[in-house]
Amino acid sequence: MKVHETRSHAYSSGNEEKVATRKQKAEAKASEGESEHSPKKAKTESEEKTRDVKKENIGNEGRAKDVKKEKTKNDKGEENGNERSTEEIIADFEKFCKETSEHLSIKQMREILEANGQDAGESDDAVVPKCQDVLFYGPLDDCPVCGGTLKITDRNFSCSGVYTEWSTCTFTTKDPPRRNEPTKLPDSVKDSHVTELLKKHQDPKSRPHPVSPAEKPLKGMMISLAGRLTRTHQYWKSKIEKAGGKVANSVMGASCLVVSPAERERGGSSKLTEAMDKGIPVVREAWLRDSIEKEEPQPLGEYDIASDISVGGKGIPQYQQDPSVEALETITSELKVYGKRGVHKDTKLQGVGGQILEEDGILYNCAFALSDKGAGLNEYCIMQLITIPEGQLYMYYKKGRIGNPDEVDEKLEERDNVDGAIQEFAKLFEGVTGNKFEPWEREKKIQKRLRKLFPIDMDDGVEVRHGGLGLRQLGTTALHCKLEPKVAKFMKVLCSQEIYRYAMMEMGLDFPDLPLGMVTEMHLKRCEDTLHEFAEKLRTSIETGPKRDALWADFSQRMFSLLPSTRPYVFRDFTDIADHGAAAVETIRDINVASRLIGDMSGSTFDDPLFERYKKLGCSVSPVEEDTDDYKMVANYLQKTYEPIKVGEISYGVSIEDIFAVEVSAGPSFDEIKKLPNKVLLWCGTRSSNLLRHLEKSFLPSLCFLPVAGYMFGRAIVCSDAAAEAARYGFTAVDRPEGFLVLAVASLGEQVTELVGTPEDAAELEEKKHGVIGRGRKKTDESEHSLWNDVKVPCGKLVRSEHKDSPLEYNEYAVYDPQQVSIRFLVAVKFEEQDVQYDAASP
């Protein structure tokens, strides 16, 4: 079903489906070569040549009528500077389009655009509405963000100029800037039938202000809801009605059916079955959210969750699939390149002993990516020179859109000699990146070029999604292990591919052609530097409005070029940056550490690989028995300071699976930390995929300062006295309920700074390195606090604090020196649904 869109007469004429007739195109082409006409002849030819232009403008007049129907009583009272109502402006524009279409040729329209400094090199279909817009409302000014040229698009005016070498400008508006100057009329139109009409609009003071009627995005749509959504049906009913739509109790006559992807996994409701039988689009909840937020109905096909289970839908690109469906596909996908020496799986040459060509210290294997939202690009490229034992040499080249196997240029070709192949490889590298190959490969010197791909700097190792324990190995790998059974089970979890695949999938960074879990320290440093640069720009920038939006868009595209995703988007706020920028870089960094520690475990498990990895880890992990005081202390601390996590309308409680005592060799020992002042036992949240790095290297400070929880203290190790806060990081997803919480002893030092708000700058805190406590809206009941081995345990019931306006929900503690933090316990937990309620099925 196609979503009907009603467009503004002033902003919709750029991309209508109009096709110039053969006669019009031929006449326009012929007229370009003719000499200047006499006034009389020009008048005659104008009448002859513009018959087809009239056809071009049927869409303009029709849209004006559509807008007239859309106007409300409030619109009628809106007036511009010339005391004309919206209805009058619409009528004038309709008449203006009709007159100009009858008496101006496309050649004359191009001349008008050129005379007024506008781009006249667009297609005939684009020239007509653009010229009419310029003549009626005035010449467009340059893009206020990058100085580029504005173009009329489907519903807006947009710019496709250059913002930085990383990104095309993404500026769009319904009310573009216009030049406050008279419209210039070329000689060819000064004696036409519409000369006087055009002169009426030459003076800026006589021009009307463009009207942009507010259109409700879901107007005229009947939407049916089914199953358990993240928000209640009543919530969405209210939102849909405010957006102009209606909610249908049945799918009969519905524009679409909105369901949770999990609905079909449960077998589906009668609504789902009926909708699929009748060919009614079945879309995920995100379609509602995006349509309402973007104020226009989004294409139903891009949110469809039913077609991928039909025979005709098996080839849907990943970036168009529902995230849960994409997850099922990528989580089981074989990693195609595991590192710098990894021969691409699609070549099939690894099965015959294929190896990456290595000459003079260079491995001829490169990966690249580019995310440029303004240019509509999200691409990757792989280039390899591969040798096989028989002596043949092959060039492999693959380039396409990330997540779409149908948009791929792929070649595997044999080459006669090494020198020629190396020269071709270097030439391809320059074509892809705009840079020379050897300076990059030997010295890592490179300059990002506009709309050129950037290298993903793979390291020489085995990515954990390839080298970690596979599902078939999990059942046998601990059978012959010398470790205590619970520790062996713990190590099996940390050495399995699964937790790393899920972590990368949750962040959308699991595209199987690019081994982000095995990149160089330099590549990770580049990601970190991008975060720091952007955070500093935001802190010091005075830009507002579109220019600030452009800054966010540029940063987002840089990040998704360095860490490619099937679903790149523009970060909207600091929480986005924290959750999907800083946390993503930290997680990829930690997965890289895990990849190097785990190595390749894809072979036999009889040689006890878990014990070998445990020894490499260099830390002590031992189970804590349930009848011990330590176990009871930890369990009580968890029970008192935990509050259920809410996902949509569902709450999740927690239960303890195991508790482990830990001694990390990279950090201070317990005896060392006991000598320090002001010690507190605190909760720390972490992903399971980050644990190996914590155990091998201890905690590292946060990457940057952001004015949100976890990052508001700058480059610090941040903990909390509430297990509820740590659980937000340990919780993964409803279908993977297992996770870990960490308890660490932190020494706050002799001097402690208390904050009740977000600091404007964390540089001073970082410099002084004093302990910091950020007071939250909730605190633990101090009357219940206790001591454990001379360490304060702030265990107590969570109660409201006096800091009701704090940006933090719970107290957070920041320490800047890693030698003041010592990991003591790991708590393996399971998250469980509480008080599950389903909306009653509609009859």
Image (tube, rainbow, N blue to C red):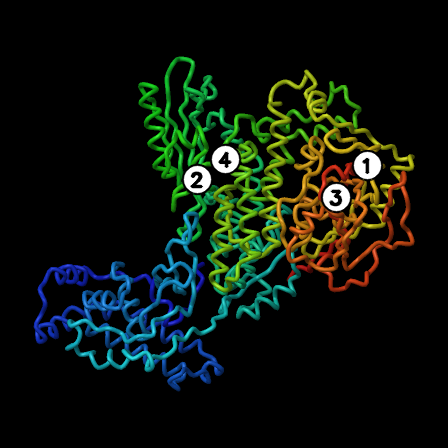
Residue 407's image quarter?
A: top left
Q: Amino acid at mark 1?
A: Ile
Check residue 684 in the rendering and tell me which mark sits there, or answer none: 3
Neighbour tally class for label 3: few under 14, some 14-19, many 20 plus, Cα within 10 Å: many
The residue under label 4 is 514
Nearer to the camera, 704 or 719 = 704
- Give the label, 1 or 3, closer to the camera: 1
The numbered mark, 1 or 3, whose residue comes first in the sequence reads 1
The numbered mark, 2 or 1, whose residue comes first in the sequence reads 2
- Give the label, 4 or 2, closer to the camera: 2
Q: Where does the image place residue 472, in percent across and percent down from the top left?
A: 64, 26
> In the orientation shown, which residue stands out farthest toward the front?
768
The numbered mark, 4 or 1, whose residue comes first in the sequence reads 4
Q: CA distance from mark 4 to mark 1?
A: 42 Å
Neighbour tally class for label 4: few under 14, some 14-19, many 20 plus, Cα within 10 Å: many
Q: Where does the image place residue 276, in percent across and percent down from the top left?
A: 52, 52
Q: CA distance from mark 4 to mark 3?
A: 31 Å
Q: Is residue 669 left or right of residue 574?
A: right
> At 59% from the left edge and 39% from the top edge, which residue is drawn?
504
Q: Does residue 289 lie above or below 701 as drawn?
A: below
- Give the label, 4 or 1, closer to the camera: 1
Q: Where does the image place residue 188, in percent across and percent down from the top left?
A: 15, 71
